[in-house]
Amino acid sequence: MANDIKFLVMTFFLVAWLASLGQCASANGKNKYVRDACRVTRYPDLCIHSLAPFSNTAKTSPTLWARAGVSVTLSEAKSVARYLVRLKSQRSSFRGRNSAALSDCIECFENVIDELHKSLRVLRSLSRGTFSTQMADLNTWLSAALTDEDTCLDGFAGQKGKLIKFLLNRVSKASYITSNALALANKLAATGLGSVIDP
């Protein structure tokens, strides 16, 4: 009886261990997709962290990775925009030059969101006949989004304070994610027409 129980317990742990090995192998497979996709980016660690949830669906498709990159960037830009508007409503936090810079920053992010929406529309309607033009438009809009984010950062150049530092960190992170999206879009453009049809 004791031997039977011992055997059952050992069998249970063996099955559990084998199952965990299978899950690790599966997770490593998914992680490989996102790591491979993010190799072309300037901020690969941030890319892997932000795009890991798309591994299972995007796999090796440059089209789907570019779309995921822009989608994540759009979500981040909207989050930053809401944060900036909240700061603006706290009138005592920013005065003088910083208040004007914050207003400019909000306007910049309105433009960023518009440019990212345009980018996403392109990626959702890719076609062989207009692929080159679509890729040129995509590059233009993502580059413009990066420029707008840099303009926001420039407005606070030389300014100090805890709130400003936090703001700059938020905007910088958005610009890094935008840079990654642009790199993924450029990879799609370089891969060519064959990548439009997803696997």
Image (tube, rainbow, N blue to C red):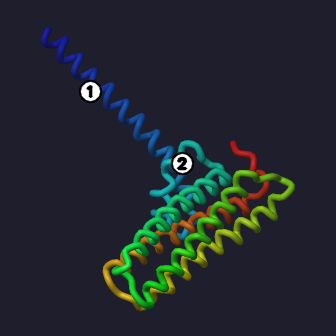
Amino acid at pointer 2: Phe
Q: Earlier in the sequence, mark 1 or mark 2?
A: 1
Q: Does dot 1 land on a helix, a strand or a loop?
A: helix
* Residue linked to disc 1: 13
Among all residues in the image, which is located at the extreme right? 129
In which quadrant of the rendered view does residue 87 lie? bottom left
Q: Residue at coordinates 19% horizontally, 11% vertically from top-left?
A: 4
* Residue 158 in sight: yes
In which quadrant of the rendered view does residue 90 lie? bottom left
Among all residues in the image, which is located at the extreme left? 2
Q: Residues within 10 Å of mark 2 (few under 14, many from 20)?
A: some
Q: Residues within 10 Å of mark 1 (few under 14, many from 20)?
A: few
Amino acid at pointer 1: Phe
Q: Position of residue 18 (x, y in %)?
A: 36, 30
Can you say which quadrant of the picture contains the N terminus?
A: top left
Residue 54: numbered disc:
2
Q: Position of residue 53 (x, y in %)?
A: 49, 48
Q: Does dot 2 land on a helix, a strand or a loop?
A: helix
Figure disc tally: 2
Can you say which quadrant of the picture contains the C terminus?
A: top right
Q: State which mark lies toward you, 1 or 2.
A: 2
Q: Position of residue 43 (x, y in %)?
A: 50, 68
Report how far apart the C-alphas of labels 1 and 2 lie in the structure. 32 Å
